[in-house]
């Protein structure tokens, strides 16, 4: 049966490893759980930044201003509520 996870070995400076262990103990979680959560959050934010950059470029190409974008977002939110 194929492995359901990949093993990743990382090196941390002693102070960061100490802080990781302190948080893990306080939250009663493993180092691996904390690192997985940190990677999930980093990947989510990286994708969000990439999407935002694409949206900014697209809006510039279309000549939209910040007020136009706010208006379009408000219109879309209102339409979804109906």
Image (tube, grey):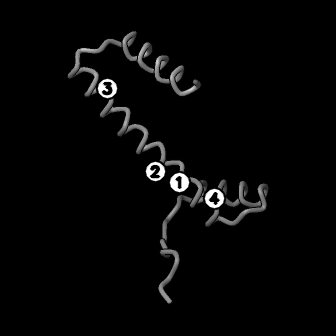
Residue 40 got which mark?
Answer: 1
Distance Cα–Cα, label 2 vs label 1: 5 Å
Task: Residue at 35% x, 39% y: name it.
Answer: 50
Residue 55 point in image, percent of width and height:
33, 30
Residue located farthest toward the bottom when viewing the structure as drawn: 1
Distance Cα–Cα, label 4 vs label 3: 33 Å
Mark closer to the chain start, 1 or 3: 1
Q: Identify the residue under disc 4.
A: 34
Tell me if label 2 and label 1 are in contact, CB under 8 Å. yes
Residue 16 point in image, percent of width and height:
59, 54
| Element type at mark 3 | helix
Residue 71 got which mark?
Answer: none
Left or right placement of residue 56 versus residue 80 in this view = left
Distance Cα–Cα, label 2 vs label 4: 14 Å
Q: Identify the residue under disc 3.
A: 56
Mark closer to the chain start, 2 or 4: 4
Mark 3, Cα crowd under 10 Å, few <14 / some 14-19 / many 20+, is some
Q: Identify the residue under disc 2.
A: 43
Mark closer to the chain start, 4 or 3: 4
Vertical placement of 74 versus 36: above or below? above
Seen from the viewer's position, the closer of residues 34 and 55 is: 55
Vertical placement of 80 versus 23: above or below? above
Residue 69 point in image, percent of width and height:
39, 17
Looking at the rendering, in which quadrant would you find the C terminus?
top right
Distance Cα–Cα, label 1 vs label 3: 24 Å
Foreground mark, 4 or 3, reads 3
Tell me if label 4 and label 3 are in contact, CB under 8 Å. no
Task: Residue at 48% x, 47% y: name it.
Answer: 44
Foreground mark, 2 or 4, reads 2
Q: Looking at the rendering, which quadrant does residue 65 occupy?
A: top left
Left or right placement of residue 79 versus residue 21 in this view = left
């Amino acid at each position: 049966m194929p492995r359901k996870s990949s093993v990743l070995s990382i090196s941390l400076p002693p102070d960061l490893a100490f802080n990781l262990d302190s948080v893990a103990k306080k939250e009663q979680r493993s180092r691996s759980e904390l690192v997985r959560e940190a990677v999930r959050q980093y990947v989510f934010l990286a994708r969000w930044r990439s999407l935002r950059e694409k949206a900014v470029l697209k809006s510039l190409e279309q000549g939209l201003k910040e007020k136009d974008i706010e208006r379009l977002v408000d219109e879309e939110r209102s339409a979804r509520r109906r």
